[in-house]
Image (cartoon, grey):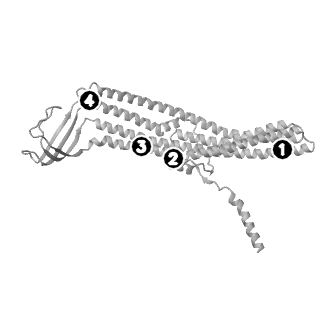
Amino acid sequence: MRRAALAVISLLAAAAPLAAQDPQPAPLTLQQAEQMALQNHPLIQAAQYGADAARQAVRETRAPYFPTAFGSVTGADAESGSRIAAGGLNNPIIFNRFSTGVTIGQLLTDFGRTHALVQSSSLVAQAQEAGVGGRRADVILGVDRAYFSVLRAEAVQRVAQDTVEARQLVVDQVTALAASGLKSSLDVSFANVNLSEAKLLLAQAEGDTRGSLANLATALGGSQTVTYALAEEPLPPPLPTDAAALVAEALRDRPDVAAERFTAQAAAKLADAEHDLLLPSIAAVGTFGATPYPQAGIEDRYAAVGVNVNVPLSNGGLFAARHAEALFRAKAESQRARDVENRVSRDVQLAWLNARTAFQRLGLTDQLFDQASQALDLAQQRYNLGLSSIIELSQAQLNKTQAQLAQASAKYEYQAERAALQYQIGAIR
C-alpha cells in the first residue's frame, strides 16, 4: 500500500509541471494568415457593404424605365350648392362621392438623361467593386508585413538570447581567471557591462516580439493577441532587371487605378445627364376606377389616359449651372486619375529599388557575419594569450552581435519589400 501511494504521489508530482506549462502556439502559414484576414477583417466587410449599396443605387436610377402605379381611395362630403371660390385655378364644383382607383405612369423618353444616369451609377458601382479589391490588397499587405515582422522579431530575440549566453560564458571565464590572479577586476567589470548590454538587448527583443504579435492580431482582423508558431516562407524569385514592365502591369491591374478611372468616367456620364435636363421629357399616364357612391348624374366608373410633355423654358439658369458644375467635376476627376497613375508609377519604381537593395543586403550581411565571427575568434585567442585587452574583445563581441542582427533581419526585410512590390504592381488580390 505504501508503494502504491508513493507511486501515485510521484505521478501527480511529475504531471504538475506539465500542467503548468504554457500551451503550444498554434501553427500558422502566411497563406492561412491571409485567408483568415480576408474572412475576418472589418475593413473588407465595410468595403463590401459599400459596393452592395452602390449596386442598389443602379437599381434606383434604372427605376424610371418601368411603370409606376399607385392606388387611391377618396371620399368627399360637400355642402349642397357650394363652390370653391379661392385657393387656385381649379374646377370649383365639388360633389359628394366615395371612389377607388388606380393610376399608372410611364416615362416614354427623356432623350437620354435616364440612360446617362444609369451609366454613371453603374460606373460608380464598378469603382466601389474595385475599391473592395483595393481594400483586400491593403489588408493582405498588412498581414504580410506583420507576419514577416514577427519572424524578424523572433530571429532578433534568438540572436539576443545567444548573445546573453555567450557573454555569460565570458563573464564566468574572466571571473575565474580574476580569482586566480590572471586577470584584473577591470576585465571582470567590462565583461559584466557587456553582459548587461546583452540582457538589455534581449529584453528589448522580447518586447518587440510581443508588439509584433499584437500587430499581427490586428492585421488578421482580431482584437486578442494570440501566439502563433509561424512557418518560414521561401525566398521569392529574382527581381526583373527593369521596372518599366512592372509599371505597365501596375497601371493595368492596380484596383485603385481602376477605381479612379471608373470614378472619372462616372463623373463624365453625370455631366451628360445634367446636360440632358435642358431637353423635354415625355410621359404617359392612365387612371381608372369606380365610384360606388357617386353624385346623381355622374357615372359610377371612370377611366382616362393622357400624355404629358414637359419642356423646360426658364428656371433662372439652374439647369445650365448644374451642367457646368458636373462638367467641372468631371474634369477634376480626370486630373485626379492622371495624378493616381503618376503616383503609382513612382511607387512601383521605389518599391522595385527598395526590394533590389534589400536583396543586395542578403549577401552583404552574410559576408559581414563571417568576417565578424573570424574577428571575434581572433580577438578571443589574443585575449586568452594576454596579447590584447578586454576592450578589443568587447568590440569584437559587439561587431558580431550587430552582424548577427543585420543577418537575421535581412531575409525578412527582403520578403517584406517583395510583398510591398507585389502590392504596388497589383499582384495582391
Spatial CA distance of label 2 from label 1 is 49 Å
**Pointer 2: what residue?**
41
What's the residue type where badge 4 is placed?
Leu
- Residue count near mark 4 (Cα–Cα under 10 Å), binned few <14, some 14–19, many ≥20: some
Q: Residue placed farthest to the left in the image?
A: 297
Spatial CA distance of label 4 from label 2 is 47 Å
What's the residue type where badge 3 is placed?
Ala
Position of 340 relative to 195 (above/below): above
Pick whichever of labels 4 and 2 is earlier in the sequence: 2
Give yes or no for contact between labels 1 and 3 (Cβ–Cβ under 8 Å).
no
Viewport quadrant of the N terminus: bottom right
Viewer-proximal residue, 75 or 323?
A: 75
Pick whichever of labels 1 and 4 is earlier in the sequence: 1
**Pointer 1: what residue?**
171
Viewer-proximal residue, 88 or 53?
A: 88
Spatial CA distance of label 3 from label 2 is 16 Å
User: Any mark on residue 278, and which?
Assistant: 4
The residue that appears at 44% across and 35% down in the rendered structure is 260
Q: Can residue 416 be seen? A: yes
Q: Position of residue 274 (x, y in %)?
A: 31, 31
What's the residue type where badge 2 is placed?
His
Position of 234 relative to 94 (above/below): below
What's the residue type where badge 1 is placed?
Val
**Pointer 3: what residue?**
51
Viewer-proximal residue, 252 or 77?
A: 77
Spatial CA distance of label 1 from label 3 is 64 Å
Q: Can residue 382 be seen? A: no
Asked if residue 224 lies left or right of residue 369, the reply is: left
Pick whichever of labels 3 and 2 is earlier in the sequence: 2
* Secondary structure of the residue carrying numbered label 2: loop
Number of numbered discs: 4
